[in-house]
Amino acid sequence: MISSGDINIQNFQSLIENYEAALKEVTGDLDDVQAEQKALKRALHENSQLRDELGRVYVDITKCEVEHTYKESDLVENLKKQLHTVIEEKEQAVKLWQNAASTVELLESELRIFHENTEGFIPKNQLTQLKNSYEAKLNELQDTVVRTKVKLEETINLKSKELQIKDKEIIGSLQSQDNTFKIIKNLEDEILNLQQRLNDSNGNKEKLEKDVRLKNEEIDALKLKVKECKAKVSEALQVVEAALNEKDAALLREAEAKEETARFSQTLTEFIEETDLKIRNIQSDHETRVEQMRQALEASQELVRVKEMEIETYVKKCAILENQIEDFRKNRTYVDDGGTSKILVLEKNLENTFQKLVSAFFAFLTPIFSYFQRSRIFSSSLKWRT
């Protein structure tokens, strides 16, 4: 027989299983909500980027002063209002998601408490109250999830429609922006051209001013040079006058110098001609004397040969006499005074003969050597002069 405690435990287990299934379903729903929330965040982020882009477009459009400024400003204001509405709806959706997240955290904390307290005994009335509270909270959570889903679907549909409308408006704005950019580009090009022309004009102006300053400086310098030239011309006139006064004297001195130079040239020419004549005469005389000396030298050489022959003859005679004297000395048995005197006389005669021969030979050679010496000195001086 099954007791009431077993029945309560079975009911409690089935309740827990139901609770866990509901919790899983809620967790799955929360995951779906989180995924939808992420998609919503991406949509909001894209809306934020579009808002920033529209803000930049608005800033660019407000800078350009054209005819359609008023209409584009109204369009931007409408877009700003719509973006503000979208932001408010996003904040509401975030609040709903935060509430759902806090509810889930509360349920998870209670579930942890429940698991911690399952080991002890739970009375039936408390279990009933707990079940009822869980069911109420689950119902509230389900209602919240349903409302959140409906709200998210409505928000997504609304935002999709708004985004489509905004896309169309943005496309139109971009077309207007392209036209505006083209106008701005043309204006910028014209401004750059005007600025370039202005810079060129300023550069030409500065260049002309610089040229004018340089020309003025050159004019002042020329004026100063003209004054200096006038002063120099005056001084030059005075110098010319003095030079004209001295010109005659200078011409006279120049004529005298030319005459003196001519005289010197004539004298030098005559001296050169006279010197050349003397040199030619000396050369002719030298050649004649050389020829005479050659002939005399040949005669002297012939005479030397004759004298050499005579010397050889005298040498032979001297040798014969010496031999005779030697033989006489060897062969004599006695020597008297008369024989001694004859020998002495013979030796003295031999010595005198030899001295005469040597003196005659040197007397013959001395004038020849002196003549050759004078000829060498004369030739050296002649070469030096030429």
Image: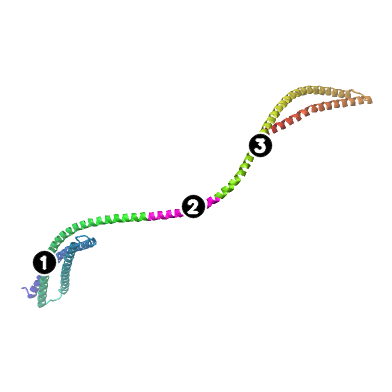
| Residue 240 % position (x, y) | 56, 47
* Vertical order, 26 against 200 (above or below): below
* Vertical order, 236 against 355 (above or below): below
Snapshot quadrant of residue 10 = bottom left
Snapshot quadrant of residue 275 = top right
Q: Residue at x 73, y 23 (%)?
A: 295
Q: Residues within 10 Å of mark 2 (few under 14, many from 20)?
A: few
Of labels 2 and 3, earlier in sequence is 2
Depth check: give the residue in front, 283 or 378.
283
| Pointer 2 residue | 226
Determine whether label 2 and label 1 are within 8 Å by CB: no
Could you tell whether 16 is left or right of 342 in the image?
left
Q: Residues within 10 Å of mark 3 (few under 14, many from 20)?
A: few
| Pointer 3 residue | 263
- What amino acid is found at the position of numbered circle 1 in the picture? Val
Determine whether label 1 and label 3 are within 8 Å by CB: no
Snapshot quadrant of residue 42 = bottom left
Q: Is residue 11 visible?
A: yes
Query: Any magenta on residue 291?
Result: no
Could you tell whether 152 is left or right of 308 in the image?
left
| Residue 385 % position (x, y) | 68, 34
| Pointer 1 residue | 150
- What amino acid is found at the position of numbered circle 2 in the picture? Val
The label nearer to you, 2 versus 1, is 2
Query: Any magenta on residue 211?
Result: yes
The label nearer to you, 1 versus 3, is 3
Could you tell whether 353 is left or right of 278 in the image?
right
Q: Which residues are magenta?
A: 206-235
Q: Residue at x 84, y 27 (%)?
A: 355
Q: How is the image coloured?
A: rainbow
